[in-house]
Image: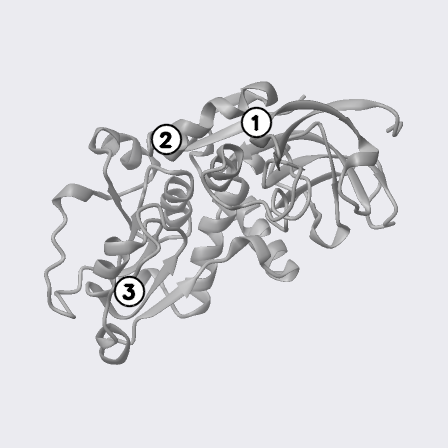
């Protein structure tokens, strides 16, 4: 790329003029430093992107920055011999739209240590239909399996099941041989969740956990995107030696529980921090997502595609809990 050439980016500012974001024209020289310049083909919209783009959450640690915690595209230039012009690559998290310019842009400059070659078995668009949400869902299962979770132990329940992480988790669990149950407030989407592989759907409003520190065990494990009372309730109803992967806080960051599930049932609560995952684990999880864990219904989960110019139209719907599945951003 000619560094004098300009391109479009969704850029976020916070200065004397206030917090604001929108499409701007910029040059490659203004991008964050890194060894690999990528012509972005696709990105995706995650909950963190909606928080960052609206200012409803403290996501960016410096300003201005381009939004978008995901990016996939073609190497335009590289000072690292491991990457050559035309290579297809992806990056999720790794400081994008937090400490460095992100993927809501026609170009992004990446650090080579976080640049992942596109695995065989995925297209660039599919990699962003997955994005951070899909990587988080697969990382949750990866950590559960590493901690002893097996399909023979029984069903895994997924909360916030119609969201990006939740819907992909249902699909990935099923592909990996687990029985998946879904908890959601969107009862009108039960059929959609069943199509993704859920064998049982439960209305969030119909849940009653009970008040004892330990209640009758219902599931062998859980992938929780909600936090708060939902996560606290789950700790009381997981079978002995099961795992809960804690992925999100859509309801609350608080957690009020007791030590009883941990010292009597041997429950493990596993934190899933996808943004800073070690490269070796990151590559292994992406290989699984491109192979035996690749969701069978990814086209059904990626319910929407928007242009870079329209990316902000997704934010309010997502923050209000009205989104379904995943939104892909076509940057070109």
Relative to the observer, which residue lies in front, 266 or 299? 266
Residue found at x 58% / y 45%: 60
The residue carrying pointer 3 sits among few (fewer than 14), some (14 to 19) or many (20 or more) residues within 10 Å by Cα, namely: some
Which part of the image, by quadrant, shows the C terminus? Answer: top right
Q: Secondary structure at mark 1?
A: strand
Q: Nearer the viewer, mark 3 or mark 1?
A: 1
What mark, if any, has residue 329 been given in the picture? 1
Relative to the observer, which residue lies in front, 289 or 228? 228
Residue 167 visible to an observer of this rendering? yes
Residue found at x 64% / y 61%: 280
Callout count: 3
Relative to the observer, which residue lies in front, 58 or 17? 17
Residue 52 image point, x, y percent: 52, 38
* Circles 1, 2 touching at the beta carbon (< 8 Å): no
Residue found at x 30% / y 31%: 192
Q: Which residue is mark 3?
A: 153
Residue 203 visible to an observer of this rendering? no
Residue found at x 68% / y 40%: 101
Rendered image quadrant of residue 86:
top right
Q: Is residue 51 above or below residue 217?
A: above
CA distance for labels 1 and 2: 15 Å
- Mark 1 and mark 2 lie on one chain; the one further toward the N terminus is 2
Residue 122 image point, x, y percent: 60, 38
- Mark 3 and mark 2 lie on one chain; the one further toward the N terminus is 3
- Mark 3 and mark 1 lie on one chain; the one further toward the N terminus is 3
Q: Which residue is mark 2?
A: 324
CA distance for labels 3 and 2: 30 Å
The residue carrying pointer 2 sits among few (fewer than 14), some (14 to 19) or many (20 or more) residues within 10 Å by Cα, namely: many
Q: Secondary structure at mark 2?
A: loop
The residue furthest bottom is 263
């Amino acid at each position: 790329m000619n560094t004098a050439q300009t391109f479009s980016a969704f850029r976020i500012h916070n200065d004397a003029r206030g917090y604001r974001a929108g499409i701007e024209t910029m040059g490659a020289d203004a991008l964050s430093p890194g060894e690999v310049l990528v012509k972005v083909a696709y990105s995706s919209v995650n909950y963190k992107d909606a928080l960052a783009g609206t200012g409803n959450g403290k996501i960016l640690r410096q300003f201005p920055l381009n939004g978008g915690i995901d990016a996939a595209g073609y190497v335009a230039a590289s000072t690292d011999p491991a990457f050559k012009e035309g290579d297809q690559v992806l990056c999720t998290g790794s400081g994008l739209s937090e400490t460095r310019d992100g993927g809501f842009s026609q170009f992004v400059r990446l650090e080579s240590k976080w640049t992942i070659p596109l695995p065989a078995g995925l297209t660039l668009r599919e990699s962003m239909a997955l994005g951070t949400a899909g990587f988080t869902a697969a990382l949750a299962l990866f950590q559960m399996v590493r901690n002893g979770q097996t399909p023979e132990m029984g069903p895994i329940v997924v909360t916030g099941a119609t969201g990006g992480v939740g819907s992909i988790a249902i699909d990935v669990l099923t592909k990996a041989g687990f029985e998946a149950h879904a908890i959601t407030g969107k009862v009108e989407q039960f059929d959609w969740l069943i199509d993704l592989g859920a064998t049982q759907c439960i209305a969030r409003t119909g849940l009653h956990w009970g008040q004892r520190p330990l209640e009758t065990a219902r599931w062998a494990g859980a992938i929780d995107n909600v936090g708060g009372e939902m996560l606290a309730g789950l700790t009381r109803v997981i079978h002995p030696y099961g795992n809960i992967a804690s992925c999100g806080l859509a309801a609350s960051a608080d957690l009020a529980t007791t030590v009883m599930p941990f010292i009597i049932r041997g429950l493990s609560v596993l934190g899933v921090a996808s943004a800073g995952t070690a490269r070796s684990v990151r590559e292994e999880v992406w290989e699984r997502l491109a192979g035996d864990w690749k969701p069978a219904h990814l086209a059904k989960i990626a319910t929407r595609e928007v242009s870079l110019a329209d990316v902000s139209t997704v934010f309010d719907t997502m923050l209000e809990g009205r989104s379904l599945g995943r939104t892909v951003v076509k940057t070109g």
